[in-house]
Image: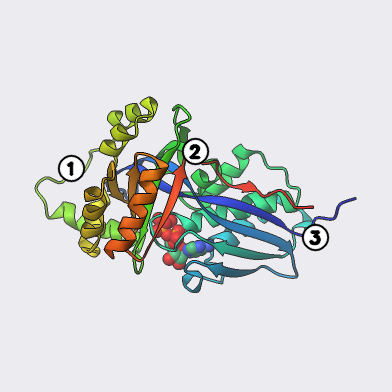
Amino acid sequence: MTIVTGVTARVPAKLNLQLAVGPPRGDGYHDLVTVFHAVSLFDEVTVEPAGQDTVTVTGEGAGTVPRDGDNLALRAVAALRKRARGGNRTAGVRVTIAKRIPVAAGLAGGSADAAAALVACNELWTVGLTPQRLAELAAAIGSDVAFALLGGTAVGRGRGERLTPALAPATQYHWVLAFAEGQLSTPQVYAALDRLRASQEAAPPADQQPGLDAGLMSALRSGDAALLGQALSNDLQPAALSLYPALRKTLAAGLELGALGALVAGSGPTCVFLAASAERALELAVSLSGAGVCRSVARVTGPVPGAAVVPAQG
Ligand code: ATP
């Protein structure tokens, strides 16, 4: 008999190829229509049986991740335990997060860790929740958690948790991520968007709901990277730029260096560039680092699958 001591799950960062934001709702949230796209920048979350729940974080931005019940991975553990009602089997866990996804960078790293913790504990405790049931739990933990489970490319509605996989050919896209110094707080970026809209005559009417961009979906169906680059959009971008003006220079530099498209990732401050090929992505990454317009760069591809258990070795 094999005794399982620990389970590790790997989970990707997300980009939003479109992020259309409606007016604020009564509960303070905004209705969204977004096209999520999972890329090959992964956190790894390991869970092991322990006396009580604890979390250790290593890697990118580890010092800024909460170590208490606010950690989204710990919240996911607690949510699954409640659902599983497994007695001693679901007692405490030691959670270890190896971060490569920068924190508060618009790439939903916290949500990713929650999704990985769900998948890993589902295995460790042999709960056997189906992907559908895990997705329901995920949606209650945070807006982006359900997509981190699903991966690929998918349309998200509501707060982003109502997902429909996008039907698209198996094209692999090459992206360059330019990481910024510092972080942007998602609630502050939404508040800045509300202020910008309130101060502009061109603001959308209060009852106007966001819509899916037909041009973007058609670009995805065609698998044509140049068309996709033209169609990228993010309603949060002006708000992120108002809080972090230096990002304008980063976006402009990437476009001058030949990117097919550029945008701020989610609520920022990461900037995202689409390249025509793996070689172009490498050239772009090297030139962007040389231009001194960001803290560091990463080359990634997408789409990739969502959170999954890493097979044990040996
Ligand atoms: P959001 O997911 O809110 O759009 P984001 O993608 O910009 O935000 P995240 O990396 O998810 O950024 O971090 C947002 C906040 O979540 C952080 O400031 C941090 O305090 C909190 N957080 C909780 N758990 C985690 C975690 N496991 N990893 C990273 N951040 C976490």
Q: Which residue is mark 1?
A: 204
- Measure the alpha-carbon separation of dots 1 and 3: 53 Å
Q: Residue at x 29, y 38 (%)?
A: 229
Q: Are marks 2 and 3 in contact (CB under 8 Å)?
A: no
Q: Position of residue 23 (x, y in %)?
A: 26, 46
Up-down: is 295 above or below 173? below
What kind of element bears circle 2? loop
Q: Position of residue 102 (x, y in %)?
A: 44, 62
Q: Residue at x 67, y 67 (%)?
A: 53
Q: Which residue is mark 2?
A: 152
Q: Nearer the viewer, mark 2 or mark 3?
A: 2
Q: Nearer the viewer, mark 2 or mark 1?
A: 2
127 or 98: which is nearer to us?
A: 98
Q: Earlier in the sequence, mark 1 or mark 3?
A: 3
| Disc 2 Cβ-to-ligand 1 distance below 8 Å | no
**On the rendered structure, is 199 left or right of 20?**
left
Up-down: is 209 above or below 234? above
Q: Which residue is mark 3?
A: 88
Density class for disc 1 (Cα within 10 Å; few <14, some 14-19, many ≥20) is some
**On the rendered structure, is 25 left or right of 173?**
left
Q: Residue at x 45, y 48 (%)?
A: 300
211 or 167: which is nearer to us?
A: 167
